[in-house]
Image (cartoon, rainbow, N blue to C red):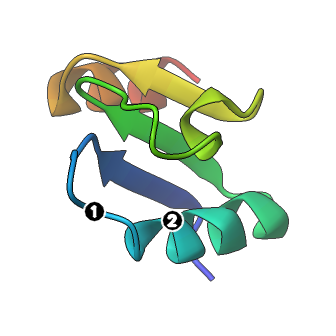
Amino acid sequence: MANVFIVRGDESGIVMYIEMGAALASGARVYAVGKCNNVTVFHFHPSVKRVNSFADVLDDLKTS
């Protein structure tokens, strides 16, 4: 299982949330990049870090 899972905000995507749920269950670090939509509650799970860009993900990974 991956140590980091990155999902890009997407109005039309639904299937990706199965993988996101699996990542959360496995304890992976999960990032939601871009505008988070209201299609799923996963974007607002306390373990999900919401960021504006992929550069923000890299910066966070470097500092932690």
Type of amino acid at the residue the image marks with label 1: Gly
Residue at (62% x, 34% y) in the render: 48
Is 13 displayed left or right of 38 in the figure?
left
- Say what amino acid the circle numbered 2 marks: Tyr
Q: Is residue 54 above or below residue 17?
A: above
* Dot 1 alpha-carbon crowd within 10 angstroms: few under 14, some 14 to 19, many 20 or more: few
Q: Quarter of the image containing the N terminus? A: bottom right
Residue nearest the observer in this picture, 39 or 29: 39
Circle 1 residue: 13
Residue at figure coordinates x 74%, y 34% from the top left: 47
Please state if 53 lies on the left or on the right of 32 as rendered.
Answer: left
Seen in the image, is 9 located left or right of residue 46?
Answer: left
Question: Residue at image x 28%, y 19%?
Answer: 56
- The image quarter containing residue 28 is bottom right
Look at the numbered discs 2 and 1 and tell me whether their residues touch, using CB distance below 8 Å.
yes
Residue 12, percent from left and from top: 20, 57
Residue 4 in the image, given as x and y percentages of width and height: 51, 56
Q: Secondary structure at mark 2?
A: helix
> Would residue 5 be found to the left or right of residue 47 on screen?
left
Image vertical order of residue 35 relative to residue 42, above or below:
above
Q: Residue furthest bottom?
A: 1
Instruction: Please give the residue where the numbered disc 2 appears in the rendered image.
Output: 17
Picture residue at 72% right of the left edge, 34% below the top:
45
Q: Quadrant of residue 54?
A: top left
Q: In the rendered view, would you say 9 is above or below 53?
A: below
